[in-house]
Image (cartoon, rainbow, N blue to C red):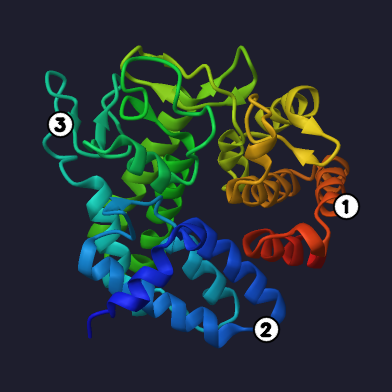
Amino acid sequence: MSVSLASEQSLTREQNSYQHIYFTMLGWQVTGKSALTEETIDILSELILQHGFIPYKAHPQPPYFALILSILQESRKTSVLSQYQAALEKEYHFWMEGSDQVTTEQPVHKSVVRMPNGCILNRYPPSSDEQAAEEATGWAGTKRWQQGTPNPFFNTIPVDLNCLLLFYEATLLSVYQEQNDKEQIDRMLYQILRREKTIQQYCWDKDRGFFTDYDFGLQQFSEALTLAGIYPLFFKLASGTQAKQALKLLETVLLEADGLAVTLNKDAHIKQLPVAAVMQWISYKGLMNYHLLTAAVMIRERWMQANTSENRDPVATSVYLKLQKS
């Protein structure tokens, strides 16, 4: 059955963007609202089957569906992944469309970029409405996309987008392992190994000791340092040495009295963006994955103390509940 227009609009308006739905679900997980989580996942699944992605003003938002499913999976004794296989494959195929067509001479097709090492990474697909496309990422209003080549947004390999797709591939691998589909298992293992290698090669800036976006137009690391560079820690892609180097940069450049700055551009309005709350959790969890407990707890406490019940928006409230439970 098709999702109603009202349901679609309620789930894709700005304050309920795709990634914010994930963090809202973290709050539901803490407060025991598993039925609401499953109902929302069903709506998202139908939207993906209709559009191939979760739309924001007709533009694709970062692919959080696999991560969202992981919340439901944690509350179940048996796997729920096969139940949503069609939606998982549909969204993944949207982002990978044309991966078999790109060549050295024609390395870009829609969301797919063939890197100089021959492997595939992803960008956001080109659009005539760049502002809406940026808004769909959740990072509009920051300086992340405003540096580099002409049209830097569409010439950027976002590190967080590619980490999300890596997790997508790992989730699909689990689906195929449950089904003992050896051909698909081999295909997905191949994709995972190549993406891991290529994120490390093109998104780890060893001179700055941090993961960054990559400008494939200029063939260089993005000048912007943002908390998107913590996604490899969140998904356990970074080495222990890389995690410690990333922490050093966090402490010396982005750590503030009220938590972490989202970018080097520390304008007050950025702290009010939902992405600011989202990134506190990503950073906390990423550091905890590498047993960097002292720093993780300090960031958690600073942000929670600065975000009392009087000044939290719904997204921040969900992050607050999850951090409090942690």
Crowd tier of the residue under label 1, counting other residues whose Cα lies within 10 Å: few below 14, some 14–19, many 20 or above: few
The residue sitting at 38% across, 79% down in the picture is: 42
- Residue 305 marker: 1
Give the CA distance from mark 3 to mark 2.
46 Å
The residue sitting at 23% across, 35% down in the picture is: 126
Q: Is residue 23 above or below residue 32?
A: above
Q: Indicate the amino acid at tag 1.
A: Gln
Give the CA distance from mark 1 to mark 3.
49 Å
Q: Is residue 65 above or below residue 264?
A: below
292 on left or right of 109: right
The residue sitting at 50% across, 83% down in the picture is: 78
Which of the two discs, 1 and 2, labels the residue nearer the N terminus? Answer: 2
Residue 125 lies in quadrant: top left
For the N terminus, which image quadrant? bottom left
* Residue 219 vs residue 140, the one in the foreground: 140
Q: Is residue 122 visible?
A: no
Q: Which residue is mark 3?
A: 102
Which of the two discs, 1 and 3, labels the residue nearer the N terminus? Answer: 3
User: Viewer-nearest of labels 3 and 2?
Assistant: 2
Across and down, in percent, residue 30 comes to: 71, 75
Q: Are marks 1 and 3 in contact (CB under 8 Å)?
A: no
Q: Indicate the amino acid at tag 3.
A: Val
- Residue 79 marker: none
Across and down, in percent, residue 254 comes to: 73, 29
For the C terminus, which image quadrant? bottom right
Element on which disc 2 rests: loop
Q: Which residue is mark 2?
A: 32
92 on left or right of 160: left
